[in-house]
């Protein structure tokens, strides 16, 4: 049984504790680990299930970051693919929920919240991953239309999404200030999923080609030139939840390791009786609690104080993902050879955690964000 003592922490209210208990019971019944077979179909099925059960309505739109984090943590503990299918509905509608017009919200949010349509967030490019300001995809106004040209890559849900939030250069200013965000329907002429990209822990991912792709001007989100801010504000909400998913993986690995250490014997004793194993178990427990404190601190800060939580989000994502990687590695070590056998739970977790230190801002980018803010605070610069 995974530790649930964190749910008594003051960052959470009774409604969160109830939500977590309900999600826990539902996930135990409904979420099965399914990495094999048709991954697209598995994701579509999961999205429909999450929609029908009402879980997507909790994050489309995100009303409360603590709920988003709790749900991701619980779903990730059961299945990485389930967590992925769940959160992408939130990330792919996050910019619409935060910056969309009333008409855009009405058109796009309810079908995604019901699980009838699938959402995606298209920011990265072959030459613009961490460096968002280098975005090269262009958007040119032509009468009542905007014409998009360029390539987006490593886009989650590519191939199964019904709409993509695409960031492109509109040129109001150089760099970060010259980007805008658009909603592009998957059936728009000139839009194509030009490649699918296999991953070490499979989920739908691919490359998008926009070629003379003509969308109505009303598909722009927010104001011209606001694209970078829209992307960053969305990531501020979702980065703590990446930490929460990492926590889910880490808790699962810790549980698996403790079960194994209590069952397996060596040199006439259970593994759990060896101090070197106990040291690992303790290190894992401390890392998990410390990560949970940062994740729920970031979520609580956004929910109760509001404003920019860039620093808190970055700390939560950085620490929780890096520590989860170590926790899972220790779990594999405790399992020994059984831990590297394809199909073992800890082997799957070992593959699943890796991407979380990269997507939605690498660990290195999170450090730049944290240092930038700390130095600005130290110099007494006003908060931005
Ligand atoms: N919320 C609102 N506005 C923000 C913001 C945020 N979280 N972060 C930055 N901005 C605004 C700034 O206020 C600034 O506006 P002004 O020019 O009006 O002052 C502007 O955006 C540029 O900000 P900044 O100068 O801090 O940006 P940098 O180019 O120095 O750094 C990094 C940006 C590197 C931190 C950013 O590009 C980043 O996070 N990159 C990683 C992106 C990522 O996660 N990629 C993965 C793809 S998504 S899976």
Image (tube, grey):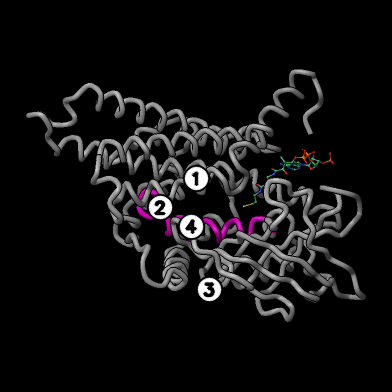
Element type where label 2 sits in the image: helix
Residue at image position (61%, 33%) is 312
Label located before the other in sequence (2 or 1): 1
Circle nearer the viewer, 4 or 1: 4
In which of the image's four quarters is ligand 1 placed?
Answer: top right
**Which residue bears the numbered disc 3?**
116
Q: Gap in Å between the C-alphas at discs 3 and 1?
A: 23 Å
Chain part drawn in magenta? 76-95
Work out how far the residue at label 2 is from the one at label 1, CA to CA, in angstroms: 10 Å
The answer, for residue 301, to whether it is visible in the render is yes
In the image, is residue 313 above or below residue 128?
above
Residue 42 among those drawn in magenta? no
- Residue marked by disc 4: 84
Query: Residue 117: image x %, image y %?
Result: 56, 72
The residue that label 2 is drawn on is 75
Please say if 6 is above or below 175.
above
Q: Which tag, 4 or 1, sits closer to the chain's start? A: 1
Q: Which residue is mark 1?
A: 69
Is disc 1 placed on a helix, strand or loop? helix
Crowd around label 2: few <14 · some 14–19 · many ≥20 (10 Å): many
Question: Does residue 358 sit above or below 334 in this rendering?
Answer: below
Q: Please name the residue shown 77% across and 29% down the image.
A: 383
């Amino acid at each position: 049984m995974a530790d649930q003592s964190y749910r008594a922490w003051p960052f959470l209210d009774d409604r969160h504790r109830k939500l977590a208990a309900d999600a826990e019971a539902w996930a135990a019944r409904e979420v099965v680990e399914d990495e094999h077979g048709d991954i697209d179909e598995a994701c579509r099925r999961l999205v429909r299930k999450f929609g029908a059960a009402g879980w997507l309505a909790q994050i489309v739109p995100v009303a409360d970051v603590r709920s988003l984090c709790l749900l991701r943590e619980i779903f990730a503990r059961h299945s990485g693919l389930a967590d992925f299918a769940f959160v992408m509905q939130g990330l792919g509608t996050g910019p619409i929920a935060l910056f969309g017009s009333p008409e855009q919200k009405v058109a796009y949010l309810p079908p995604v919240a019901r699980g009838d349509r699938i959402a995606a967030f298209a920011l990265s490019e072959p030459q613009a991953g961490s460096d968002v300001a280098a975005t090269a995809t262009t958007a040119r106004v032509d009468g009542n239309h905007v014409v998009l040209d360029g390539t987006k890559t490593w886009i989650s849900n590519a191939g199964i999404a019904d709409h993509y939030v695409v960031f492109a250069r509109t040129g109001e200013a150089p760099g970060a200030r010259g980007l805008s965000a658009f909603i592009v329907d998957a059936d728009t002429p000139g839009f194509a999923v030009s490649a699918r990209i296999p991953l070490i822990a499979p989920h739908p991912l691919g490359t998008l080609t926009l070629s003379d792709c003509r969308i109505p001007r009303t598909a722009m989100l927010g104001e011209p030139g606001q694209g970078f801010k829209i992307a960053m504000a969305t990531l501020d909400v979702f980065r703590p939840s990446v930490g929460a998913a990492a926590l889910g993986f880490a808790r699962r690995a810790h549980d698996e390791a403790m079960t194994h250490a209590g069952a397996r014997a060596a040199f006439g004793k259970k593994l759990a009786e060896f101090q070197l194993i106990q040291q690992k178990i303790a290190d894992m427990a401390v890392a998990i609690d410390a990560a949970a404190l940062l994740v729920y601190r970031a979520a609580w800060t956004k929910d109760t104080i509001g404003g920019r939580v860039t620093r808190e989000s970055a700390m939560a994502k950085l620490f929780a993902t890096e520590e989860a990687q170590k926790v899972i590695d220790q779990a594999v070590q405790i399992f020994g050879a059984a831990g590297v056998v394809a199909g073992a739970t800890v082997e799957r977790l070992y593959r699943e955690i890796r991407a979380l230190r990269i997507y939605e801002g690498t660990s290195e980018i999170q450090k730049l964000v944290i240092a930038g803010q700390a130095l600005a605070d130290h110099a007494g610069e006003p908060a931005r």
